[in-house]
Amino acid sequence: MAEKPQPVRVLYCGVCSLPPEYCEFGSDFEKCKPWLIQNVPDLYPDLLKEANEKEADKVADKLQSTGISGAGDGAASSAGSVCLCNPYYDFDVLAPKQEEDKQEVVIEKVVRNKRKCITTVKGLELFGVKLSDASKKLGKKFATGASVVKGPSEKEQIDVQGDIAYDIVEFITDTWPDVPEAAIFFIEDGRKVPAA
């Protein structure tokens, strides 16, 4: 009697859930590469070579950035380089300084659909103002829609419907006395202009 056929075991990619042979035709081949290198290195030997070359380049860059040369003597590559093994060395010199946010409120008018405007208020949170409360107060005062949104720089800002740019300065200084009028700026034609 003939032997009973056994089911075929098919390995599927852990990223795109296709068989590994078809990963290169899927939409996420770049994301599949680490999984393929780890689980089926014999299927794509070029990927393994490429990964090894990238790893070697990363190690060489790290060594070069720390000042260690590949010359073999183990010394620093130049006399002016810093030895990072010194426990008394100040590492703040190597780290780039991050600029602190200036305490200023920036008001910008954005025109959309030729006639409709949105007034954007940025920087109120630097003065201790809660943006959700501020958007409610702005919406009630100017009888318009106001909401807290994330801007292009991933910081939250208030978008108010309508052209209220010049009326808003007086309202901000009256409602929140911690915000001085000298710290309020407009963006006009790409330039920052003081409101005062």
Image (cartoon, rainbow, N blue to C red):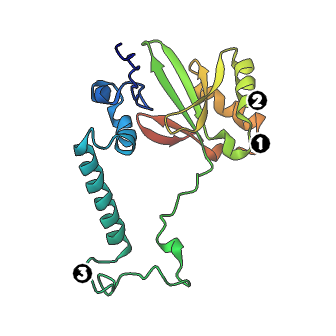
Place of residue 98 in the rendered image (x, y in percent of width and height, measured from the top left): 53, 59
In front here: 172 or 99?
99
In front here: 63 or 97?
63
Mark yes or no: residue 2 visible. yes
Judging by the rendered image, the residue that carries numbered circle 1 is: 177
Q: Quadrant of the C terminus?
A: top right
Place of residue 43 in the rendered image (x, y in percent of width and height, measured from the top left): 27, 38
Place of residue 3 in the rendered image (x, y in percent of width and height, measured from the top left): 37, 17
Q: Quadrant of the N terminus?
A: top left
Mark earlier in primary sequence (1, 2): 2
Above/below status of 28 relative to 106: above
Mark earlier in primary sequence (2, 3): 3
Judging by the rendered image, the residue that carries numbered circle 2 is: 133
Judging by the rendered image, the residue that carries numbered circle 3 is: 71
Above/below status of 136 relative to 94: above
Above/below status of 112 relative to 76: above
Residue for point 55% across, 83% down: 87
Residue 156 falls left or right of residue 63: right
Question: Image quadrant of residue 37?
Answer: top left
- Residue type at the position of mark 1: Pro
Asked which secondary structure carries label 2, the reply is helix
